[in-house]
Amino acid sequence: MTEEVQMALDEAKASNEKAIQHLISELEKIRAGKATPSLLDSVVVEYYGALTPLSQLANVSTMDARTLTVQPWEKGLLEEIAKGITHANLGLNPQNNGEMIIINVPALTEERRLELVKKAKAEGEHAKVSIRNNRKESNDLIKSLKSDGLSEDQVKDAEAKIQTITDQYTKRVDEVVVVKEKDILTV
């Protein structure tokens, strides 16, 4: 196997790994009814005229399975943080007690759980599309190497290996989505 073919295979694996990591980060944003600090990762707060991630302005922790606390490093930010959480459209209702923000995470209804499962499956489909696009790019690269002197058999072998890599990563996407689905449906 030539270096170029190995490079194409390595690139396919790296691109697919990025797709899996992106899927995992997107699925972490889908709440499963439990309070986790990562629920607030997408929250940005206006801080001296700039939109700043909440994690850079406050300590986010869980008080119990249904309650998040946000302890800002500057007390003057309490109102802005509450506003940022509300504007993030997470379905959370922040409460300001003068010291910190307390957020009660409501229990999910069965209907909402099914909606979240659909959303998780849609994210899985996005990851699969990305993986298939990576396969196409890798196959195109292999075909371009054919004009540079790669034999027909080497092209077929490389394409078969790329398909094997694609199948492995597609299976991993399914496994990740199934785990998230069980997490969402667990009451």
Image (cartoon, rainbow, N blue to C red):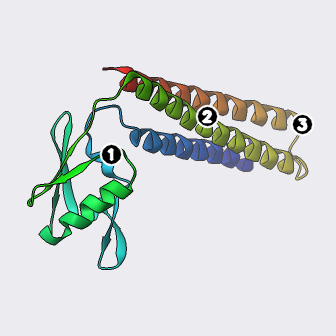
On screen, residue 55 versus residue 160, left or right, reads left
Q: Which of 6 and 70 is in front in this view?
A: 70
In the rendered image, which residue does mark 1 sit on?
Answer: 39
Please name whichever residue, 59 or 82, is drawn nearer the observer in this view of the structure. 82
Residue 25 in the image: state x and y as whole percent.
44, 44
Q: In this view, does 58 lie above or below 109?
A: below
Q: Where is residue 87 in the image (x, y as percent from the top left)?
A: 37, 57
Amino acid at the residue labelled 3? Glu
* Whether residue 76 is situated above or below residue 155 in the rendered picture: below
Residue that badge 3 annotates? 152
Q: Distance between the residues labelled 1 and 3?
A: 51 Å
In the image, is 147 to the left or to the right of 164?
right
Type of residue at label 2? Glu
Label 2 crowd (10 A; few <14 / some 14-19 / many >=20): some
**From the viewer's perspective, is the residue at label 1 or at label 2 nearer?**
1
User: To which quarter of the image does residue 160 belong?
Assistant: top right
Cα separation, mark 1 vs mark 2, equals 22 Å
Residue 156 coordinates in the image, percent (x, y)? 83, 32
Q: Nearer the viewer, mark 1 or mark 3?
A: 1
What residue sits 44% from the left and 24% below the top?
111
Q: Which mark is residue 47?
A: none
Residue 53 position, x and y percent, is 33, 63
Q: What element carries label 3?
A: helix
Q: Which element is circle 1 on?
A: helix
Q: How far apart are marks 2 and 3 (CA)?
A: 33 Å
Q: Who comes first in sequence, dot 1 or dot 2?
A: 1
State the residue position of label 2. 125
